Amino acid sequence: MAPIAIDAQALLQSTYSILPEILVVATALFVLFVDLILPEENKRVLCGVSIIGVALSLFAVFSMGPARISGFSGAVVHDGLGAFFEIVILSACALTLLMATGYSEWEGTHKGEFYSLLLLSTSGMMFMAKGTDLMTVFLGLETLSIPIYVLVGFHRNRMSSIEGALKYFLLGAFASGFLLYGIALIYAVSGTTKIPQLAAMLLDASLAGNPMFLAGAGLLLVGLAFKVSLVPFHMWTPDAYEGAPTLVTAFMSAAVKAAAFAALIRFLLLALPGMQPAMGKILWILAVLTMTVGNLSALRQDNVKRMLAYSSIAHAGYILVGMVSGDVLGGQASLFYLLVYAFMNIGAFGVVMLIAQKEDEGYDIGNFAGIGFRYPVLGALLTLFLVSLGGIPPTAGFIGKFYLFSAAVKNGYIGLAVIGVLNSAVSIYYYLRLVVYMYMMPAGAEAPAPRPPRVAFSLALCASAAVVLVLGILPRSVLEFAERSVLSLLM
Amino acid sequence: MTGPADIIFYLLAAMTVGAAILVAILPNIVYSAIALLFSFAGVAGLYVYLSADFLAATQVLIYVGGILILILFAVFLSNRISDVKISNPSRFHWQAAFICLGLFGILSYTAVSTAFPVKAVLSYQPTTSEIGELLMTRYLLPFEVASVLLLAALIGAAMLSRPDGGRGRPAEMEEPKR
């Protein structure tokens, strides 16, 4: 084989194409070093350093613009879709870090490892969102997952935290095996792991109908479905979400989901036309199962964290509806919904975190009784986030669901849209149940006062609330951005 | 077309698969670990058979020499793990058999029905330098991301295993009830 020359120019461009990721990884390393020299009582500086790093990376994404920059012989590409998901993931990370200023103080997670693991996981997510090679996607997925396993078990003296981490780790390792096996089978039959090349080869029917390719694509789907917790692969979600420190739960529910969906969207939007109708049917069934099982299980939960965990499963189902549609409109709706979901879910977890005070027993729904009138701001914020999660106007959650279901109708999936709307009606019951507890139940005798939030924490909550409201009223510019992102992928 | 090379292949394959089955069904985890050794060695043999010399060497170095020793150490350091009852119990036999046989059926069907591009002549050339060059050029990014991944795993392992706060105090957790 002839040697492959990689000249300085190409290397420079490749490095530029992953500039945001480099900034995040560098911040993670810097945090580790600073951790060594900081005295024990000044550890919150680490949080500030991390926030600055994430802000720099976000700035880099914005200044690079939507131009298509391909790097490392097609292993990674910075395009509109990658930029969109980088913004979602970095915003989720920034919100989490802002909330960490308070949460880490209460729960003792002001540690160098906590922040560097959070940042390393973020970098893995970004690689996953930008990867155009299945190998990059797999490595990004692992770089995302391993820090998350550790972060779930960060509270080592809480049994539920360790239990959640172990369940997540064992099932996650298994799912990674499925994903890798799927990639191997696809490579065996097509000779490439590059997603665009695969998509081009799929136009030839002999590959699309090849049983080994179908088995590979199926295993790949299983691996990614596990990470976004689609229904037959969702068993770990309630335990891991309940056991994890709430801050990590918020981060997982928004950012991990966005990253795994980014890879799924890139693969499906490109490859789906060649794999219809079989793949469309599978996705249809998965979407219906995920929405229905998630919502019906959430109905019976008395633990707010567990309820939000099941609701996050249901939301993965809604987002999958956009994938079933499989066209630009569906992709655009999924992208928009993932962005909105990140803000409203992290916001909801943030308020819940303030009210609950104690991990485990603090999240019982009884603790939320009477909060609404005693603490009007917290009550109003949580109500806003829950209303948005339920999909009631004038919030961004409504606009997102509206676009998802109208994309389904436009592509002839009327049954799916009807099931989706019925499901959101069911979900309103359990979201509003919490609101009813807050406003209509008398507070218990020794109801604890919520923690006073720090400035940064309030900033995160206000930013989330602002995004939920503004995108609920003026969604146009972001919707257009999402559309451009999807188009940049298809061109 | 049964030459001595084919017989060696079938022996290697039988050793790999047979040992893997033993890993799953043996009740004592120490025996399972030893069976795993043979499975790993069989895979290394298959790599040699496919003229993948570098892969075969790393398979022996990392899996046989590293991972397996680690597993054995973990087993020996764990309390009462050699007790058959808690060592390697298996449950849900029928459900597992059903799922695994289904998967086996699908995968063997795909393997049989696919026409693989077969190389006419296998050239037994060293592959190490080629792999090294590819890792530094075409696969530079996966190579570098893997280092980030390993760093994350290292931090995570240190974080989970060391005493709370790193001050020599063991983590306070209730003893699991037996």
Image: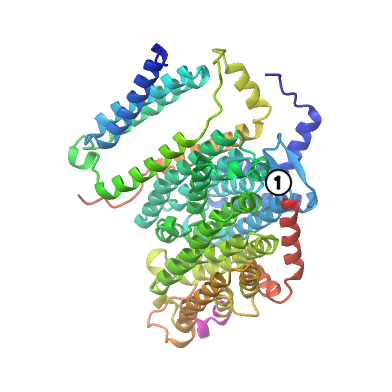
- Give the quarter of the image for residue B111: top left
In the displayed structure, A314 sits above or below B41; it is: below
The x, y position of residue A202, in whole percent, is 63, 44
Packing grade of label 1 (10 A; few <14, some 14-19, many >=20) is: many
Q: Chain of mark 1?
A: A
Q: Let me know if residue B4 is in the magenta part.
A: no
Q: Is residue A144 left or right of residue B104?
A: right
Residue tagged 1: A20
Say which quarter of the image contains residue B140.
top right
* Side of B158 where A117 appears, left or right: right
> In the image, which residues are magenta?
A371-379
Magenta stretch secondary structure, dominant: helix
Residue A193 visible within the image? yes
Residue at 63% across / 40% down in the picture? A133
Where residue A412 sits: x, y (%)? 61, 69
Closer-to-camera residue (A249/A286)? A286
User: Disc 1 residue type?
Assistant: Pro
Q: Secondary structure at mark 1?
A: helix
Reply above or below: A96 against A143: below
Q: Nearer the viewer, residue A407 or A436?
A: A407
- Does the segment drawn in magenta span residue A374? yes
Image location of residue A358, percent across then percent down: 42, 66
A457 or A5: nearer the viewer: A5
* Figure check: A391 above or below A288: below
User: What is the x, y in percent for residue A459?
Assistant: 65, 67
Residue at screen point 23% across, 43% down: B89
A288 relative position to A88: left or right: left
Q: Where does the N terminus of chain A fall, quadrant-wise?
A: top right
Q: Is residue A303 above or below residue B20?
A: below
